[in-house]
Image (spheres, rainbow, N blue to C red):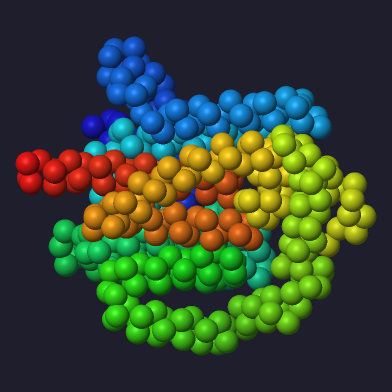
Amino acid sequence: MALDMLLRLVALFSPISISITQILYGVIVVFLIYSLVKGSYREIAKSPYLKYFALMAAVLLVTTLLGDDPARSFKKYKEVLLPLTFLIGYYMCRRSLLYGVIFWTIAGGAIASIWGEIRYLLHESLGGPDDRSAGFFASPVSFGNIMALVVILGVSVLILRQYRSTRERNIYIIMTAISFMGLGTSSTRGAMIACMAGIIVGLLLVFRLYGIVMSIMLTGFAIALVMAIPELKVRFSDAILRWNDPTTSLGWRFVLWKESWQVFLSEPLTGVGFANLNQHFIAALPVKHQSVAHAHNNILQILAEHGIIGFIAVTALHLRLFIDQLVGTIRKNGFALMGLLLTVVFFVEGITEYSMFDSEICMLYWFIAGGLLAAQHSNMREYVQSKG
């Protein structure tokens, strides 16, 4: 019971507070270590995913040691541990508990969205952003990317009818709608496009021909919504009309992407190491229009910091999960499709943001993906046994 409560709290606080979430994960890890000593959860050692995690950690350790500044890189190397939340989701979220975890994740998103709207409206007294909603986070971008994952979870539950009563369905509709509002007012374009991509893929896979019609209608509604809200209209117009202007956020991303590619070409095998790419930005880009913290792109960030060998190691882990989800979806497993849609959103977000080792986004994604994959494998075993 105590573990179940901890997992539900992790789900609730993931869209709200990264600090509290990390503390809760710490308590769960202590419990897990104690259980391993007592003989429980021994199957974790046999997990193929653990081998992929170990390979990734080992390769990224090499790229850290061979990078420009190993001392600086070691401070960020701990980010390699973030995807291990997958194992917590996979081995500790029983299918019955998974429903609660998903419910409380969406509830946390709704709470964060409501608080974001309050901060947005009362920004002068509460210190929130004056033009974009950020929830409980400092950055509207982080908040928007989290909300995109929350919204696709809610939409997945609804289109796949993974609720257990009419009352629960209505609650999911309300919480998902509130989370969608938070995503919209964050004005995070990449997250909004990623969420739309996930929803459209879901509609097409679930409703087939009707899904095409629904996707066209949804796209039209989204365009109308963007045109009706001045902040969104300005941001999307800038992205289209001023895409090559470095003073805009998208134009500045093109500058960072070009420089990231040059850094990769300078060290193609092992890269420059964790946390060293931004030092190249600082040296090479005398005019700073926007943030130079990272490349704002998962692929270019991994290539520049860890080279080809690091990229292969990271890709192998994600590709294994994607193949599992895709195979389950082909076999008409609802949990597999939910995981696949979550992965679609996560990777589309990574086109314009660095989400691969971003703690808020990464931990939530891997935790929920692990729980969904466990439920998918459980369903498949039951299907095989029923046919046997």
Is residue 281 placed above or below 77 in the rendered structure? below
Residue at position x 80%, y 61% from top?
255
Image quarter of residue 375:
top left
Q: Quadrant of the N terminus?
A: top left
| Image position, residue 317 (x, y; %) | 48, 39
Is residue 341 placed above or below 9 in the rendered structure? below
Image quarter of residue 351:
bottom right
Residue at position x 42%, y 25% from top?
29
Residue at position x 74%, y 62% from top?
253
Q: Quadrant of the C terminus?
A: top left
Q: Please indicate whether residue 187 sits to the left or right of residue 1 in the image.
A: right
Is residue 291 placed above or below 19 in the rendered structure? below
| Image position, residue 27 (x, y; %) | 42, 27
| Image position, residue 76 (x, y; %) | 67, 33
Furthest residue toward right: 286
Q: Please indicate whether residue 320 sits to the left or right of residue 126 in the image.
A: left
| Image position, residue 132 (x, y; %) | 62, 68
Closer-to-camera residue (188/331): 331
Furthest residue toward top: 37
Residue at position x 59%, y 66% from top?
190
Closer-to-camera residue (243/127): 243
Is residue 35 placed above or below 211 in the rendered structure? above
